[in-house]
Image (cartoon, grey):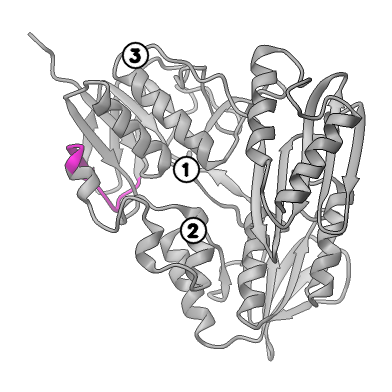
Amino acid sequence: MSIERTMCIIGNGCAAIEAIKALRENDYAGQIHLMTNSIWPSYNPMLTTYYVAGKIDFENLFPLGNNMDFYQQYDVELHLGSPVVELDAENKIIRNEAGYKLEYDKCLVATGSSPFLPSIEGITNNRVYTLRTVEDAQCLRKALQDSPKKALVVGASMIGIKVVELLYNAGLEVCLADQATHLFPLAAHPECAKIIENRLVEKCIKLRFGAALQGIEESSQGLCAHFSESDDPEEADLIVICIGVRPNLSFINMDQIKVDKGILVDDQLRTSNPDLFAAGDVAQGTNLMTGEKEIIGLLPNARYQGRIAGRNMAGREEFYRGNIPHNITHFMDMVFTGLGDLRNGSREEILRDTDSYIHMAWNGKHLVGVNMLGPSCAGIGIIKNALEKSLMTNTYIDDDGLCSNKLQANLLFRHFSKQS
């Protein structure tokens, strides 16, 4: 006699969807409950800038369609629009804000992350925006319909530069500010960042680095933002905060589950409780570069983690070794790629021509970090796959044509420039 089991998925992003698919595709036939504070079908937060900019229609925010067909197809019981407020991992009980209570056999936490807002005066002003949720995108798009003239973007991040681009293309005068000393401080070498910054300045985008936002107030001109590095405030009609995200963990009992910056998971995506799993932006898995536990908040990472978690919840024994920090973003007719960590290298090499730039770092024969800047992303996937393979097999990248010495580096550069 089979025993009816109940699986619960908390969250509705990429990791949650992949887990649901993996459960059903691995012969799990019991109940699946999905609990989320969102009222929408699963959407991609990275597409919000494209929607605000008018590059995609509203329906294209939803990779599975702006309907509930996916959940019907996979026989998922939905509990929408109410955040989980309690997770009792020891007794396997979940309760949401609406008062619904569920007892589960296994559970996946895939609640993603939310924009971080500093605790400063004026941060709750209705002309201060973030950009991650469907509601965020709708609000900012509506604000642009009022024809603002000046905008301030706080945060020289990947999302920050995309917001700068959409506001610039909308005809606004834009200032980009960050307390870091250069653009993309976690991903870009200062020399690479400087090239990008010069191109932004050429487009009359104002840059304020080394500037920590300290307060926002109303003024006769709209909003007035004050910074740490100068007495000169920044005037704007609207402000967008893009200084990073924090995992959604408010319902986690940290006396029951081991948590650092995120929920600590093993190579099977299990938490310290064997029947509780975590995936996506809330999960602190393995960084292949360092071997340390780290949140790698990227869509491919969330997809793989959700898939492996779902398979293991269904009774399989599968492992996810980890990932490497990597960022690829297209903006202002440029493509920037950051792979690994250039700061961990003992040897560096820079190759450039008029349009393209490559900065590589090694420890001995091991490639540990790459920055690439050019008009296209040609060759990026090849390098990333080779770098991951070298880390997983404890080998170095040699005669397969990727960066083991000056000759190979130049071959890569010529390939990259030709494709660009």
Give the amino acid at mark 1: Gly
| Residue at the (62%, 66%) spot, across then down | 163
Please check the rendered image and state whether residue 237 is part of the magenta-colored stretch, yes or no: no
In the picture shown, does residue 392 fall above or below 136?
Answer: above
| Residue at the (72%, 51%) spot, across then down | 336
Rendered-image quadrant of the N terminus:
top left
Please check the rendered image and state whether residue 79 is part of the magenta-colored stretch, yes or no: yes
Question: Viewer-proximal residue, 255 or 115?
Answer: 115
Q: Are marks 2 and 3 in contact (CB under 8 Å)?
A: no
Residue 111, image x, y percentages: 43, 41
Give the spatial CA distance, label 2 vs label 1: 16 Å
* Badge 2: residue crowd in 10 Å (few <14, some 14–19, many ≥20): many
Q: Is residue 57 left or right of residue 232?
A: left
Residue 252, image x, y percentages: 44, 33
| Residue at the (72%, 76%) spot, across then down | 174
In the picture shown, does residue 352 fall above or below 388?
Answer: below
Question: Viewer-proximal residue, 363 or 419?
Answer: 419
- According to the picture, the residue beneath numbered tag 2 turns out to be 47
Instruction: Please report the bounds of the magenta region as a residue range.
Output: 73-83
Q: Which mark is residue 112?
A: 1
Decide which of tag 1 and tag 3 comes sooner along the chain: 1
* Badge 3: residue crowd in 10 Å (few <14, some 14–19, many ≥20): some
- According to the picture, the residue beneath numbered tag 3 turns out to be 316
Evaluate whether residue 228 shows in this view: no
Question: Viewer-proximal residue, 365 or 376?
Answer: 376
Q: Is residue 41 left or right of residue 371?
A: left
Decide which of tag 2 and tag 1 comes sooner along the chain: 2
Element type where label 2 sits in the image: helix
Give the amino acid at mark 2: Leu
Q: Are marks 2 and 1 in contact (CB under 8 Å)?
A: no
